[in-house]
Image: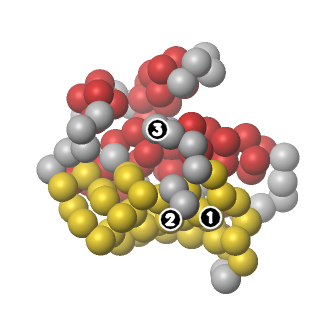
């Protein structure tokens, strides 16, 4: 299981897609439901800078990654999102880690991710 989202002990969403597509699917899922994203706990296999941008944008306040990049973790911490992990790595082997710079605003980063996902 790549992405699992919980509200309390209840699983409210799962997705096994690749790259950031499960997080975009979660974003779509939340648009149609009366669920406070701050009440959710997200678990994902990989959390890098791109995932961190999407998690922050949705308003999720707690997450856990099997593997988390230091760039993703610093972004989450900067936005007061609690993140735990099994393994912290310098960066993920993914172009998204390089494309999203520290100088980008959250809106610009989201626009770039949307474009790369074919959603823009």
x%, y% of residue 63? 47, 65
Q: Residue at x 42, y 67 (%)?
A: 64
Tag 3 or tag 1, which sits nearer the N-term? 1
x%, y% of residue 33? 84, 54
Mark 2 — residue? 43
Q: Answer above or below: position of 71 versus 9.
A: above
Inter-mark Cα distance, 2 to 3: 14 Å
Inter-mark Cα distance, 1 to 3: 17 Å
Q: Residue furthest bottom?
A: 9
Which of the labelled discs sits on residue 39, or is there none? none
Tag 3 or tag 2, which sits nearer the N-term? 3
Tag 2 or tag 1, which sits nearer the N-term? 1
Inter-mark Cα distance, 1 to 2: 6 Å
Q: Residue at x 47, y 27 (%)?
A: 113
Dot 1 falls on a residue whose secondary structure is: strand
Crowding at dot 2, Cα within 10 Å, few <14 / some 14-19 / many 20+, comes out as many
Mark 1 — residue? 5
Dot 2 falls on a residue whose secondary structure is: strand
Q: Answer above or below: position of 97 versus 87.
A: above
Crowding at dot 3, Cα within 10 Å, few <14 / some 14-19 / many 20+, comes out as some
Which of the labelled discs sits on residue 19, or is there none? 3
Q: Choose between 103 and 14: the one closer to the eye.
A: 14
């Amino acid at each position: 299981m790549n992405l699992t989202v919980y509200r309390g002990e209840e699983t409210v969403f799962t997705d096994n897609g690749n790259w950031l597509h499960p997080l975009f699917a979660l974003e779509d899922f939340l648009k149609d439901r009366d669920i406070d994203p701050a009440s959710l706990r997200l678990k994902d296999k990989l959390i890098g800078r791109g995932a961190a941008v999407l998690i922050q944008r949705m308003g999720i306040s707690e997450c856990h990654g099997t593997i988390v990049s230091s760039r993703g973790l610093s972004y989450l911490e900067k936005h007061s999102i609690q993140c735990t992990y099994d393994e912290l790595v310098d960066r993920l082997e993914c172009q998204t880690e390089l494309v999203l710079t520290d100088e980008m605003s959250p809106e610009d980063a989201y626009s770039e991710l949307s474009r790369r996902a074919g959603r823009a």
